[in-house]
Image (cartoon, helix red, strand yellow):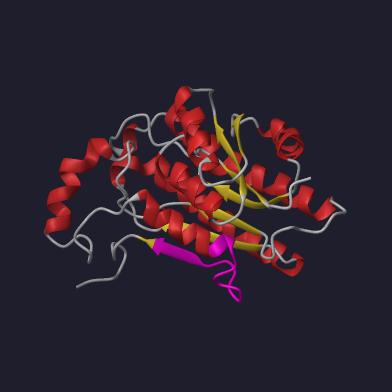
Amino acid sequence: MSHRPIALVTGSRRGIGRAIAIELGRAGFDVALTDAVASEELDQAVAEVEQTGAGAIAVVSDLADIDSHPSTLLDIEARLGGSIDCLVNNAGVSVMSRGDLLDVSPESFDRCIAVNTRGTFFLTQAFAKHFLARSRPSVAPHPSVITITSSNAVAASPLRSEYCVSKAGLSMATTLFSLRLAEHGVSVYEVQPGLIETEMTAPSRARYDAQIEQGLTAIKRWGVPQEVATTVRTLATGGLPYSVGQAIRIDGGLLVTKY
């Protein structure tokens, strides 16, 4: 059995999730990287984590398939030979197309809720039940659940309404899990990225560049995935030991109230 704790990072093929997986490998975790489909890109992410000296595996898992969650957790522990002590809920989807709230389709709404809110809620539930039921002690000194939401959990983006709803619901779920698990030594946190430079945000780059220059964010630039990953590492390694249920904003001051 490995003497390293295991971190499960969902949606870690690219972008923020990939940066988190690599950073947790550097921090002493073995890492399970998940994505909905097998791909060369996912395998490359695994190889990058292995270069840190960590054990790493690719896990093909549909987050929306909640019945598969318990077996996925068992499979990860069997393959890596240890216990999952850190769950990073990073996987998510955006809207099928931007548009008026009055034109949102049930298909796009249901997709956002199924993955971003429902899937993540029930994966966290499955992890919590699995964690509390196991007999062996945690390898990690600070077991944790870290959920990546968005600035849109708080700030409305009218052209992506279904995404905002899904992230706001996930924010509340994170608060609820923090209250339920604190007495068992599991610290639950929310991380709210703002404008982070990824493939997902690339189509909006030109539009936001001008707004950033005009003061949309206090720090006048885009954030990068590594800045989110560094925050997650701090939380996963017990850097905020007397804190649970907090939402950490990695947004360059986007949500700071201004007038």
Rendered image quadrant of residue 102: top left
The residue at 37%/43% (across/down) is 161
Q: Looking at the picture, how far across and down is residue 236, in whole percent?
A: 58, 60
| Magenta residues, start to end | 235-249
Judged left or right of residue 30, residue 166 is left
The residue at 37%/29% (across/down) is 96
Secondary structure mostly taken by the magenta-highlighted segment of the chain: loop
The residue at 30%/54% (across/down) is 223
Q: Looking at the picture, how far across and down is residue 195, in whole percent?
A: 30, 51
Judged left or right of residue 113, residue 218 is left
In the image, residue 14 sits, relative to residue 175, either above or below, namely above
Residue ranking furthest to the bottom: 242
In the image, residue 175 sits, relative to residue 68, either above or below, namely below
The residue at 35%/57% (across/down) is 155
Is 240 colored magenta in this rendering? yes
Q: Looking at the picture, how far across and down is residue 92, in whole percent?
A: 48, 39
Quadrant location of the N terminus in the rendered image: top right
Towards the viewer: 100 or 250: 250
Quadrant location of the C terminus in the rendered image: bottom left
Towards the viewer: 39 or 177: 39
In the image, residue 123 sits, relative to residue 177, either above or below, namely above
